[in-house]
Image (cartoon, helix red, strand yellow):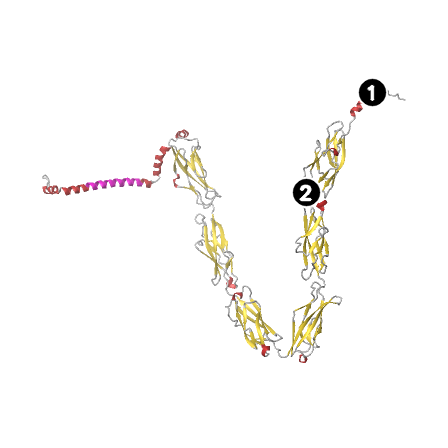
Amino acid sequence: MKHARHFTPSFFLNFVHVCLVQANYAPYFFDNGASSTNGNMALLSLSEDTPVGTHVYTLNGTDPEGDPVTYGMTCEAGSRSYFAIDTNFGNVTLVEELDREKEDEIEVIVSISDGLSTVAEKVRILVTDANDESPEFINTPYIVQVPENTPSGSSIFKIEAVDKDTGSGGSVTYFLQNIHTNKFTIDRHSGVLRIKTGITLDYEKARTHFVTVVAKDGGGKLRGDNKVFSATTTVTINVEDVQDTPPMFIGMPYYGYVYEDTLAGSEVLTISALDGDRGKPNNINYCLVNGSEGSFEINTTTGAISVIKNPSKLKKEVYELKIQASEINPDGDVTAHVFATVIIRVVDLNNHPPTFYGENGPQNRFELTMYEHPPEGEILRGLKITVNDSDQGANAKFNLRLVGPGGIFRVVPQTVLNEAQVTIIVEHSAAIDYEKFQSLTFKLLAIEVNTPEKFSSTADIVIRLLDTNDNVPKFSSDYYIARIPENSPGGSNVVAVTATDPDSGLWGEVKYSIYGTGADLFLIHPSTGIIYTQPWATLDAEVTAKYNFYVKAEDTEGKYSLAEVFITVLDVNDHSPEFNENIQEKTMIIGSPVKIEAIDQDAEEPNNIVDYSIMQADPANVFDIDQSTGEIKLKSYIRSLDIIHNITKNKDCVWSVVIQAKDRGSPSFSTTAVLKIDITEEIKSRVKSYVLGLKKQPWTIFGICMSGVLSTISVTMVISTITYWKSVKRSRLHPQGKIRKIIRGPPKHSVC
């Protein structure tokens, strides 16, 4: 037997102290009713249009021991995570778009922890509706069959549209577009489509109606604004024919004639009636009601009326037959009928209709071949037509007329008694056009004038046309614009022109040519209309950039038309910049630039834009050059000749600078030149510049020398002239002295 364990009082006190230290109470969420931002999200509801990123709730709770708490939120496995949570502060943010129509409740597990204990609770968040859905029609397309005898006001179809929203946003009302022109109305709540009151459908007038139906929801809030959505659909209403229209006779009035030589049993005329209901027509049955007096009968199926007696035994001249046409339905019953009167005249003498004759006897077809566009008023002499009626008196009088394209020909005479030669005359020459039609067909109709029978006969007139050259070639455009690079080789294609002539055969063939002051460098293919450069031609945009000339399209008889051609020669970079002649030497005054200039003979930018640069100078760090203008300046630190003397041992201050001028074309061309620059100060430079300028202008030096020589000669001549005139004057004043000198003779010491 084991000994019992003995515990001292101090042991019990220590045990109680340990239990009190280790006791820990779980944290908890505050009651939701305490604050709008406190709690565990129970009873939270969110509108489905809440923007992503919105702070939607703050979880809030506490720990009984006052320890800090953290928050958590999880979803069930497979569920979509809509929220993110700040674990320290409990702020809940929406991170996925809500859609009530897909998910109207969201279950999440929220938790609060003090580090030792964690309390988790499942809460449901309600997603409330926003008006974000449009009505949708179901069971489309809508095609309705409606009998034409459907009473007005009848409902014929029910249209249904649904809106997934709730409340007013999910309610749907209906209305029709173009309500004033429609034969239909719609119940705005039920969608029932009806025929308007007082309106009936008629298959014979309209067999199909198209009705546009609009479904509109009741509106609601969406992201703070009131939104109303709608949808449209088309209802096709096919009207079905019903037997509601009686038959009708066609070709009325009906007249028939029985001649004296008519045989018994011969058909006089045929009448015809149709069921007014064209959708499903019934058969028509004919019967002779009265007026026959036993002399005529009618075929019940075809409506053909025949004489059953010999005409010589008929007692009356005019018979009025009353004919009934009845509809027979598939069961054989008569459903409707109508009546018509047929007048039959018995003719004793007039038993010959007008007859057409050709050169070989009776003929009902006449043909003629002629050229188009004959002169107006010309007679068609190739048609030899005679018309004759063998009856006598009024029975032999008849009219002639042409039936066919109007206004082209007229027939002469228009009224004939017994017999006449028929003449057809041209009235409208322009309409007789081979390019419009190669043949014209007319009917020549002869119909009696004063006879009750109105006997008639016809003959076909066929006129075959021959083509003439009556059209001018026509270009597809009044002008053609082309561009060609200046370096294109000779024979290069430039542009193709096109002209057409609707005439046939050789008359429709077009030959092309070009002429004009700008056409010298170009050729045109006479058949294809392709314009190309002469084989030897060299295009130069710098010499001539634009050419302008005419092309002619001409047919075999010389009829032609013109079009204008504009050709632009496109510049290519084929010139190098060239310096002007006075670039060899320049005098530069300190503080002032000197300028060089190079010209590029290309026609267009950038080929003719020149950039300048200094390629070489000794010493190098003395000059700057403006890339665009060509101005050369001393470096900014050079302000006197003393500075220059310190730079170089060349005391005369003359530099040789290698300058490059380069264009901006592609490929680029450049030119270099050596420029001597004499640097001087202002006073000294003026004299030196003038001397240097004279050195470069020999003709100016020559002119100065010549001016000096001429001035010396002029002064000498003036002095000589003055001396001469003084001596002449002196001799006039003292003539004795001259005589005395003559008398004296030579000096005594002279030897002869």
Residue 534 location in percent, x, y? 46, 53
Residue 238's place in the image compared with 126, above or below, is below
* Towards the viewer: 1 or 638: 638
Q: What's the magenta bit mostly, secondary-structure-wise?
A: helix
Q: Which residue sits at x=57%, y=73%?
A: 400
Dot 1 amino acid type: Phe
The disc at residue 421 is: none
Q: Which mark is residue 11?
A: 1
Say if residue 165 shows up in the picture. no
Q: Is residue 608 above or below residue 146?
A: above
Q: Give residue 231's position: percent from left, percent from top.
A: 68, 49
Where 389 sits versus 277, above or below?
Answer: below
Q: Does the image show residue 155?
A: yes
- Which residues make up the magenta segment? 702-723
Quick check: 44 left or right of 564? right
Query: Quarter of the image containing the C terminus?
Result: top left
Q: Picture quarter containing residue 322?
A: bottom right
Residue 222 numbered mark, or none? 2
Q: Amino acid at mark 2?
A: Leu
Q: What is the quadrant of residue 600 in the picture? A: top left
